[in-house]
Structures are given as structure tokens and as C-alpha cells.
Amino acid sequence: MEITDIAGVYCNGVKEGKFGLGLVKCSGTVAGVFTRNKIKAAPVIVCTENIADGYVKGIIVNSGNANAFTGEQGIEDAREMCRIAAGLFGCNEWEVAVASTGVIGRRLDMEWIRVKAPEVYAGLGNTKAHADNFARSIITTDRFVKKTCSEKARIAAVAKGAGMIAPNMATMLCFIFTSAKFDSGELYEMLRKAVDRSFNRLTVDGDTSTNDTVLLVSTGRERVDAGIFEEELEKVCYSLAKQMARDGEGTTRVFEVAVDGAASDEDADRIARTVASSLLVKTAIFGCDPNWGRIVAAVGYSGADVDEKITLSFENQTDRVLLVDCGRPVGNEREARELLKNSEEFVIKIELEKGKGKGFAIGCDLSYDYVKLNSEYTT
Amino acid sequence: MEITDIAGVYCNGVKEGKFGLGLVKCSGTVAGVFTRNKIKAAPVIVCTENIADGYVKGIIVNSGNANAFTGEQGIEDAREMCRIAAGLFGCNEWEVAVASTGVIGRRLDMEWIRVKAPEVYAGLGNTKAHADNFARSIITTDRFVKKTCSEKARIAAVAKGAGMIAPNMATMLCFIFTSAKFDSGELYEMLRKAVDRSFNRLTVDGDTSTNDTVLLVSTGRERVDAGIFEEELEKVCYSLAKQMARDGEGTTRVFEVAVDGAASDEDADRIARTVASSLLVKTAIFGCDPNWGRIVAAVGYSGADVDEKITLSFENQTDRVLLVDCGRPVGNEREARELLKNSEEFVIKIELEKGKGKGFAIGCDLSYDYVKLNSEYTT
């Protein structure tokens, strides 16, 4: 299934060097979840306003320039993008959602957008090639396009982003479409939960961008059970989050930290995030070093209520290697090293004896290439 | 001035490969500040107990093994270290302070300590050579010994640690001696403040060790004004924290993030720490890239109350380059790049218009060598 299998979704895009422009014509109910960064890019502010009534007629997205930290002029430019799209879609500017990704602090090249938008619009369509054009138009440093779908819940989605890797280059943008019928309030509640259990669990380097935007648009009238839809939406978002982790700059391995037995769910989440963000853990995993001492130390400084009664294991789809059993090191380092070497994805399982709190986070390793990409890229 | 200029301090140490043992004979009042990691190493627990009465007769320290995550046996071993030292010093075991640094989760080689301690004790003395032996005995991955002094306040100190770099290898240990007379309550209050404005500001990678220990021992009866002592003690700790940052694994540049005009001091500290810990900021600085967009994004996601009215400049001892003036990028990137290239130390100055809150943090850049050292080191 593709985005273009969703009723009434027509898209297209162009990419010229670093710069891209994409359009989606899609009429329906909408909900959005945006960055929690206090410095919000202009398109985030304008998009939030435009979708507030719960309806949308189309989406315009540019890549290569984030239109962030651009003051009043930035707001005006984001509105102008909506006006340009509205002129083409034949709707009002406040019926258009807008998103941007790219460099911070530079004015948008409005002339380029003005010239390109009609070209993109002229090529709108609902084939796989159209969807691919759109997906390519919104990526920046991404090594590949992220997409997934749920046949069952009539959902298809496309995303860009390599975690929250590089605010000035690699914002997370995600556009989810469904022909299942829900009003915008229902969409929002389900989207908020799904984002919290997917993108918000992803810690590539802990930085969150000024432009992060997730939109969910319902264009159809199909009936899908809300419970099933919610479950499938979470799977869609989780899959995209994993794809982003896999595309983390220089990433060689993706892992989930799963915590059980914490004093509360909040504590479990705190532990999971702290372990997944620890540079020492991330570099150890890059080196295939089952350095459980670093994991235990991260559990200790997470701020959660913990003691030494920790059980720690590494798991992949076929194996489980126990490293620490209720506070006692068991000495399976060699087996654990083999598991790491043979796994592009694995789980760090941490069990405490504090309560019933569960939580998880998604992380990736830290390699030479991360440093290379982020130190050599220049403004 | 050296440690051994402090009245009544005698020290010595041995280093054999990865393992070291150091002794200090020093009778007086004492205060200690320890790791806030919830998983505390055995020596931290035992040392906290032993200095609780405010008096100490000597210190025993080993390197190469952290005696952390070692359960009841670890506690017993830490106590045994104190007993061994007490036997030599001719005091009670509860009058001995103890500290360890090294690998987590392995039992101490008590036999080695039992054999080496009398050798070290036999060589105790108060010359520079003795102090150097002690300083060398406590280091692990450190590239150099950290020490400093204040003639004015009669303080001398020695430390090990490369920030909070590698919990299983590079704990922060610091031993500060003074011949100024203060009771242990006074010492504690002054030490707590000094640590909060120095070591606690240091973010090399955000990880804090299971073993971090700072001890302040007053061995003499000299009279020093409390205000002057407090000020000088802070300078001593700040100098050692900077030395640790400079010795950060793979560090090429040390910087201070100084924040002014925040809504509160807490907000200012939060912003400073967030910027100093941002991997994107750290890698940009390694690449001499004045990437202010990453700094502004970090200010935004710090959680502090901020808006776009940010003024941002880079400063070293001779120059100041303004990059953002009250939210407006000013385009001095070339000058800023030159400043970075020519500065081993510099300040990222962030001014907000939210209030009178001030704060700071100490950071260092992130280089290929950080990844190399931490991925190739194996348990």
C-alpha cells in the first residue's frame, strides 16, 4: 500500500540540489503534533494556527531552509507559502498546512518557491512515482526515504529525518494519511499517544529540532474500529521512528532499551532514555563491547528510584544473553559480544525490583561518522 | 606551593600497570562531597560513614578497580582497605577515608593491596616526589596529573579524572588539603558550594560515575578569613574542573557557556548545561564551525523559559565576536571561525531578556578520538 492508495491524496515534489518543494492535495480532517522546542520555526507557528479548526485542503513543504529564527519576516514567508499553495489548490490560505526543514536563520527564497509551486502542482498525481517525488522533495541529509503503511487501518505515511540529529539540517517531518473516518479531536488524541510511544522515544543525540512536525490527515469515509486504528497508528509511527534511528548519522546499530519493574512508568521511561542517550553506552555498542558497567552507571544517574538489584540482558530475535542477574555479574561477556556483532537491531532489557513500572526508548550507536558528519558540515 | 607544603600531610603511592595504591597521612577535620549516582560504589558508602564524625587520620586510595557493583563483599573489602591503612597509621579503621576508581563489577585484589600498602607506607614523605607518586598512583586514563593550590588560603589539591567521561575507567577523585583551621561543618558548607560551582558544571558527556569523591581535609591551625578561603577554594575547584575538561578523552577545545538575563538562576544553569552537553554543539566546535543555529536550538529545548530575543557571542581573552544580536543574525561567521581556530579556551556568551538569572557550565568538544577511546576500550 502507498500514500497514493489513500482516497483523494494527490502529491508531487521537486528536488534541486539542497532545495526541495512538495505539495499534497488532500481534503479532510487533520491533527498535528509539533516540536516542544521553545524556539519554534515560523512554519510550525503558522501550521498550528491553520490546522486549529481541524480541517485542511492541502500541504506545502520545503526542504533546504528551515525558516526558523527568522522573526516576523519568517512568519510572513510561511503565510505566503500557504497563499501560493491556496492559489493552486483553489482554497483559503488558512486551509493549507505548511512545514519546512533545513538551515536555521536564513530567509526563504520565496521567488524559487513561487516559480516551482505551479510546476509541482501541474504534476500532482496518485501514482507511486508521484509519492516518491514528494518523499524525495522533503529529505535533506537522509540516506533513504522513510515510509510505511497499515492495510488494516487504511494508513500510509512518509517521513524524513534521522532522529533529532541535526536541527539545522535534519528536522523530523512526518505526513500520515488515512481513508478511515475520524474527526480531528479523535485524530489528535490517537496521534498524540502514538507520537509519545514512537518519535518521542527516539534519542539519537538528545537534540530536538525547531521544526519537528507530524500531521495526520483523514481524507476518506471508511469505517475502521478506533481500537484497531490506534494500535496500527502506533505501529506506523514506531516503524518510522526505527527507520529514522537506522538512518542516524553514522549509525551501524539500532537498539531498544526496555525497562520493567521500575517504581513507576515515569521512572522506567527515565531510565530507558538515560541509557539510550548515554554516550558511553552508544560508543560501547559501536565497538560491540557488552559494557554493562556503563549501563548500570547510567541507570544509577537517571534520577529514578533504583538500587543494585538490577537484571540486565541483551536480546535479539533469536537469542537472550544474561549479563547481570539481580545485581550479580554472571560473566557472559563473550556471548554478549557475539550477539552484538550479529545484530543490527537488539534489545537491552533492564529489570528492576522496585514496582510495576514499564518503559522503553529507541537508540542508536555513536560512530566516527557521526563526529565526521557533524563537525565537517559547515554553516 | 605543593600538597606537601601543608602542615602534617605525608603521602606516597605506587603504580603497577593499570593498578595503583596511594596513602595520605593527614590528621584533622574533614568534609566530603560524593557522587549523586544512585548506584554508589562500596568505598563511597564506607567513606561517607567514616568521615561522618568530621575527623580523619588518613586516606587510602586504589586505582584500576572501582569496587563498584560488588555487593556486600565490596563493602567488606572497602572496610578491609581502611583496616589495612589503620594498622599502618596506628589509628582506628573508622578514622580512615577510602576511595577507588577503575573497572566496575569486579572484586578488588585484596592480596595486592595488603602486600603493597606497607611498601607505600614505608615511603611516606612530604617532598614533591612523594606528592607526585601519590598523584600518579590514583590516575587511570588521565593523560596528565591535575593539581593546583592557593598560597593565600593555604590550600593545595590533587585530582584525577577526565570529566565524567568513563564511569568504569575514569571516576573523578579530588583530595584537597589546607592548613587553615575550620571545623568540619564549615568545611562542608564551603566545599559543597565550591563543588557546585566547579565539578558540577563540568559536562563532558553527561555521565556521572559511581565513585566520584571530593575530600577536603584541614590539618593545621592557621587563621584564614572564611570569605577569602571560600573564594579561593572555589578557584581551586574551578581550575581542577577545567584541567579535567582539558583532559577529556579526545578533547581539543574547552569552553565555558555563560548565560545572563534568564528568568532565574536555575533557568540560566539549565540553558548553560544543555548547550554545553549538546553533541551537535560539541562536534561543531571540534570542526571550528560557529554554528549558532545549533546553539539557539539547544537554548530552545533546554526547558527554560526563553524566546527569540537571544544575543550570542564567542569570546576569548582578547576578542569578542557577536553572532546574534537580540534575535537578529549579524553574519560574523568568518571572524567567529577564526576565533575558534585560535582558541584552546573560549566562552559562548548567551544573553536573554527574561530577567536577571545568571549561570554557567564548562564543556569540551567531541572529536573522533572520543569515539575511538570509548568504543575500542573493552571490558
Image: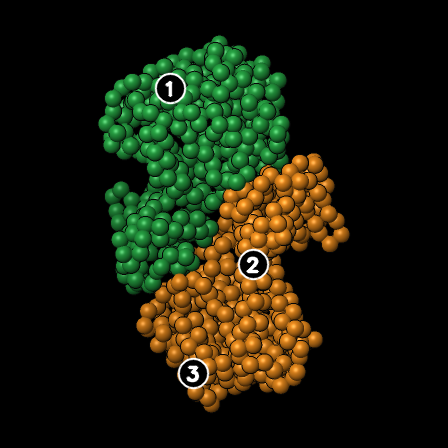
Chain colours: A green, B orange
- Amino acid marked by disc 1: Gly
Q: Is residue B199 visible?
A: yes
Q: Quadrant of residue B235?
A: bottom right
Asked if marks 3 and 1 touch (Cβ < 8 Å), the reply is: no
Residue lying at 60% horizontally and 20% vertically, measured from the top left: A110
Q: Nearer the viewer, residue A319 or B159?
A: B159
Q: CA distance from mark 3 to mark 1?
A: 74 Å
Mark 1 vs 2: CB contact within 8 A: no
Establish if A181 lies above or below A88: below
Residue appearing at x 39%, y 63% in the figure: B39
Which residue in the protein does label 2 denote?
B201
Q: Chain of mark 3?
A: B
Nearer to the camera, B321 or A178: A178
Question: From the image, which quarter does the C terminus of chain A lie in?
Answer: top right
Q: Which mark is residue A28?
A: 1
Asked if the residue at tag 3 contacts the one at tag 2, i.e. Cβ–Cβ closer than 8 Å, the answer is: no
Q: Secondary structure at mark 1?
A: strand
Do the residues indicated by labels 2 and 3 lie within the same chain of the protein? yes
Where residue B94 is drawn, which disc sits there? 3
Specify the subunit that label 2 lies on: B
Q: CA distance from mark 2 to mark 3?
A: 32 Å
Residue appearing at x 54%, y 33% in the figure? A41
What is the residue that sits farthest to the top in this orientation?
A: A122
Front one among A182 and B112 = A182
Query: What subunit carries mark 1?
Result: A
* Residue B283 can be seen, yes or no: no
